[in-house]
Each structure stands twice: as structure tokens, then as C-alpha cells.
Image (spheres, helix red, strand yellow):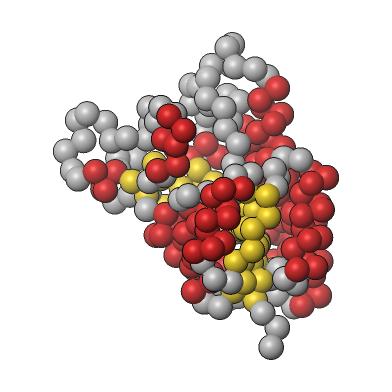
């Protein structure tokens, strides 16, 4: 029997890892792409049915070679989850403009290349799914996000364009906007200071867990989008913690 193959980019210690576990639980073999070899190797040993590929998706030549390797090692993916993200926070006057191009390459251009690589096989197979994890920056610009928000907005519009093109060919494309802070322990690895938006604010009256979007819960939504019935496809899903003001 042919194995179900899922390719996940940006497999770190939070959302990407949770998505990987969720698909493996349903019998998928998962190709995990990320830059951090140590984290990938640990997860590959921990979760049977996975294979790790060290890849910076912003390096488009390396990305193409990695996709070829996934096909050779595992087979043709029927699901793609683009979870990799590159972000720069700072004012437009202070931040390096080169970071905008870097962020665009990882967040948007890589999605285009991934879709071009996997969609033809999905069309031939009669179905497939491409799911992109986004965030609130895809919907609005705020201070200190000038080098990040435009790339996520472009990513969302690209995904919508893909959805309109591929939907009639039975390939489902969905965009999951995560409107909240994700519980991501890796943000403090290596002595790094947690971003100001990550921990609950001083006046947060609820439990710490209520502040965060939990990675396992995100993974359930990503999995659901990838397996919706073709008569009830969702393109744009916005998820947020129940207690967050919006």
C-alpha cells in the first residue's frame, strides 16, 4: 500500500513539531524541513515515521534539491504544510531593508516554489492539500512590523490565488491565521530574550495557559483543513485563544 506523505516546513519545537505528530498519528510519513539539525534529529528519533531534511527554504536552490530528495526517499507528498516563517521586528527607519527581501523569500516566494513542485502530482493523483500557517500580520500592519507584515499579507494573497486555481482541480488550499501568541519554548533557547509579545502581560488576570495558542490545538486545525470534505472546503480560518480581546 502506498504511504501517505506530508511535507512540513519550519519544523521547530512548537507548531511544526505538533503538526508532524498529528499527521504521523493518522498514518502519514512526514518529511520535516527546518534549519536546525539538532532539533530535527531529536524529533526524528522521537517520532516514528518521520524523516528530517536540513533546509533553509529561503535558499530556493536548496529547497528544490530537498523536494527532490523527499520524493526519492518517501514519495510524492499529498499534503504540504508551509509553516516556516522569517520575521523582523523594528521600525522601518531602523531595520535593515534587506530583511524585507529575506522575509519575503521565506514566507512567500518559497510557498510559490513549493506549490509549483507538489501541485502537479496532486492534480495527477486527483486530490491533495496545501495548508499555510499565517498570523495577524497577514491582515493588518502595525508599528514595528513594516518588514514582516507585507510578506505575510502577500503570502495570504498568494495562497488565495492558489486556492482559486487549484480548487477546481480537487487540490484544497487553506490559510490558517493564528491570532495570538504560541507557546514556543524554543524562543528562549540559547540565552535569547523572549519577545515582548510572547509572555502574558503583567495585568493578565487568567492562568498563563489561557494566554497562549497551544501548538497541539493548532495542529488539529491544520489537519482538519487538510482533510475537509470537498463540498465544505474552508480557505481562511482565523484562530485565537478564547480569552483574548479582539
Where's residue 152, x and y in %? 60, 39
Q: Name the residue at 70% across, 22% down.
A: 98
Q: Name the residue at 19% across, 45% down.
A: 207
Where's residue 228, x and y in %? 54, 72
Where's residue 83, x and y in %? 58, 50
The extreme bottom residue here reads 1
Q: In the figure, 111 relative to 200: above or below? A: below
Q: Is residue 71 left or right of residue 141?
A: right
The extreme top residue here reads 93
Q: Name the residue at 70% across, 83% down.
A: 2
Q: Is residue 209 left or right of residue 65?
A: left
Q: Say which quadrant the C terminus sits in.
A: top left
Q: Say which quadrant the N terminus sits in.
A: bottom right
Closer to the camera, 136 or 41?
Answer: 41
Q: Name the residue at 81% across, 60% down.
A: 68
Residue 44 visible in the displayed image: yes
Residue 156 visible in the displayed image: no
Amino acid at each position: 500500500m502506498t504511504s501517505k506523505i506530508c511535507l512540513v516546513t519550519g519544523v521547530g519545537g512548537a507548531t511544526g513539531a505538533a503538526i508532524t505528530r498529528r499527521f504521523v498519528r493518522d498514518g502519514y510519513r512526514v518529511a520535516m524541513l527546518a534549519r536546525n539539525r539538532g532539533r530535527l534529529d531529536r524529533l526524528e528519533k522521537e517520532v516514528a515515521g518521520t524523516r528530517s531534511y536540513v533546509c533553509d527554504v529561503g535558499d530556493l536552490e536548496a529547497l528544490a534539491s530537498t523536494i527532490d530528495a523527499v520524493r526519492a526517499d518517501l514519495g510524492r507528498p499529498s499534503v504540504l504544510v508551509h509553516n516556516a516563517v522569517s520575521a523582523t521586528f523594528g521600525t522601518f527607519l531602523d531595520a535593515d531593508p534587506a530583511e524585507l527581501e529575506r522575509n519575503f523569500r521565506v514566507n512567500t516566494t518559497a510557498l510559490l516554489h513549493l506549490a509549483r513542485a507538489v501541485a502537479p502530482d496532486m492534480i495527477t493523483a486527483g486530490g491533495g492539500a496545501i495548508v499555510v500557517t499565517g498570523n495577524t500580520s497577514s491582515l493588518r500592519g502595525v508599528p514595528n512590523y513594516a518588514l514582516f507584515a507585507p510578506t505575510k499579507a502577500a503570502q495570504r494573497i498568494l495562497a488565495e490565488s492558489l486556492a482559486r486555481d487549484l480548487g477546481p482541480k480537487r487540490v484544497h488550499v487553506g490559510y490558517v491565521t493564528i491570532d495570538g501568541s504560541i507557546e514556543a519554548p524554543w524562543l528562549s533557547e540559547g540565552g535569547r530574550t523572549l519577545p515582548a509579545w510572547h509572555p502574558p502581560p503583567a495585568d493578565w488576570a487568567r492562568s498563563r495557559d489561557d494566554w497562549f495558542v497551544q501548538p497541539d490545538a493548532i495542529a488539529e486545525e491544520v489537519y482538519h483543513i487538510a482533510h475537509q470534505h470537498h463540498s465544505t472546503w474552508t480557505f481562511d480560518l482565523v484562530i485565537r485563544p478564547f480569552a483574548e480581546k479582539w
